[in-house]
């Protein structure tokens, strides 16, 4: 009963509501597909959610500190092995190797990475950079060595995911881990320098693609510029669509155009569940209507009111997660809750923003709404860890001594 007193019921209720909304959206998107196998995808989503709920409850009532001490390092090592295996043995789907048998290792690696960063840099220590009495991890966090350790831990899975290639998943790791490192007070000069380098690099890539793709550029100059851009051809096309959305509307820009039409046609109150014309007439590409662009299906059928309600539900999920981090007296719990909450926020923002043209299109699912068993299980497991931080926040545990 004591633990139930700290159980965050708002976050739990929001998660259940989002699962229900997502199941309905998957049913609607799948019913428009000509292949009968997709008509029952909503049932698969419910079954996966049931297993995810069991994992969620087990993690919620298991002390997260014991989980981190026992599994942070082994789970990270396993995730690295799986990411390497998918590059060797994985199935190629839509030009990328992301699937290993029946699951996506890149999704699992997100939670494993957040767990390891929380364990490494969230140990309760004296935060004074003058008093170096916290042992190995605490003493290093304020120096270049701590920054180098964090860069190595984050960089290995990020590079393996980029090699698939999966730029979207890598982009979600950046805000989640950077927020964690900032709160952990890892060498901030390095973090600021890394952020500036990333911003300059992104601006340089956008500028190069713009210079190469703008009207009137000779083909030879275009090819010479694009050789310097560290992106795959399909990624360059997505950036070009983002920069010049009104060009090639029947080719590379078709998906974004149809996404905007689908969202806009929903109007204020929508056309009703299962009555989205853009989806059922197959103007919205069917290959991505159930996952990456499912917000377009939902927005057409539920309209502005339904879309706003969906954002409120996500808010009821993320705000309590940040509150759990705020009230946590343990550094590991604080970083764990912030990391998972930021990861979910990054997915929500990027998925919806790409659907309306605010960011380049990238293959990134919308939490609880998009079809995807591995992703759904991963998100629910992550939220179970956040709930564990809330449930066990008043419990004390002897901290292990980590010496240099």
Image (cartoon, rainbow, N blue to C red):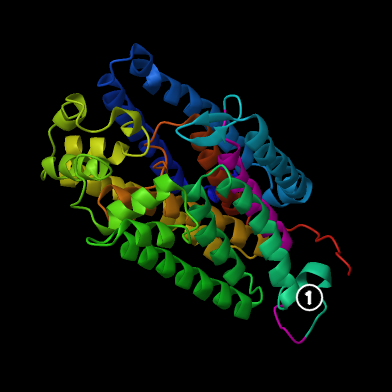
Please check the rendered image and state whether residue 326 is part of the magenta-colored stretch, yes or no: no
Q: Quadrant of residue 222?
A: bottom left
> Horizontal and vertical percent for residue 386?
56, 50
Residue 360 showing in the rendered view: no
> Horizontal and vertical percent for residue 167?
49, 50
The residues colored magenta run 103-130
Q: Which residue is drawn at the image coordinates 21% and 42% (left, top)? A: 306
Identify the image quadrant of the N terminus: top right
Foreground pick, 192 / 319: 192
Q: Which residue is drawn at the image coordinates 80% and 61% (left, top)? A: 399
Residue 15 showing in the rendered view: yes
Q: Quadrant of residue 208?
A: bottom left
Foreground pick, 353 / 128: 353
Against 283, is 84 above or below?
below
For mark 1, give the secondary structure. Answer: helix
Q: Quadrant of residue 269?
A: top left
């Amino acid at each position: 009963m004591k633990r139930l007193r700290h159980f965050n019921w708002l976050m739990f209720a929001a998660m259940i509501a989002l699962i229900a909304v997502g199941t309905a959206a998957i049913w609607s998107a799948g019913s428009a597909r000509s292949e009968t196998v997709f008509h029952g995808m909503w049932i698969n989503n419910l079954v996966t959610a049931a297993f995810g709920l069991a994992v969620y409850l087990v993690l919620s009532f298991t002390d997260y500190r014991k989980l981190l001490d026992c599994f942070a390092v082994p789970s990270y090592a396993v995730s690295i092995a799986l990411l390497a295996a998918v590059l060797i043995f994985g199935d190629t789907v839509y030009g990328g190797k992301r699937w290993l048998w029946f699951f996506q290792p890149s999704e699992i690696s997100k939670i494993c990475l957040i767990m390891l960063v929380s364990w490494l840099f969230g140990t309760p220590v004296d935060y004074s950079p003058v008093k170096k009495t916290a042992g190995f991890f605490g003493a290093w966090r304020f120096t270049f060595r701590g920054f180098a350790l964090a860069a190595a831990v984050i960089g290995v899975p990020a590079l393996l995911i980029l090699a698939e290639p999966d730029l979207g998943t890598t982009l979600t790791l950046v805000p989640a881990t950077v927020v964690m490192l900032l709160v952990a007070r890892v060498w901030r000069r390095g973090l600021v320098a890394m952020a500036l380098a990333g911003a300059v690099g992104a601006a340089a890539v956008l500028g190069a693609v713009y210079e190469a793709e703008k009207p009137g550029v000779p083909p030879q100059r275009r090819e010479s510029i694009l050789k310097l851009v560290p992106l795959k051809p399909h990624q360059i096309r997505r950036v070009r669509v983002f920069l010049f959305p009104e060009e090639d509307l029947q080719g590379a820009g078709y998906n974004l155009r149809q996404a905007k039409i689908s969202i806009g046609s929903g109007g204020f109150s929508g056309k009703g569940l299962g009555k989205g014309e853009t989806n059922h007439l197959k103007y919205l590409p069917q290959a991505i209507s159930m996952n990456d662009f499912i917000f377009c299906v939902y927005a057409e059928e539920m309209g502005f009111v339904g879309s706003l309600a969906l954002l409120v539900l996500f808010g009821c999920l993320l705000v309590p997660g940040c509150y759990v981090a705020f009230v946590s007296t343990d550094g590991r719990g604080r970083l764990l809750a912030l990391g998972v909450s930021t990861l979910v926020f990054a997915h929500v923002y990027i998925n919806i923003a790409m659907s309306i043209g605010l960011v380049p299109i990238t293959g990134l699912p919308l939490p609880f709404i998009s079809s995807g068993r591995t992703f759904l299980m991963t998100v629910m497991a992550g939220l179970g860890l956040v709930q564990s931080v809330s449930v066990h926040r008043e419990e004390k545990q002897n901290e292990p001594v980590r010496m240099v």
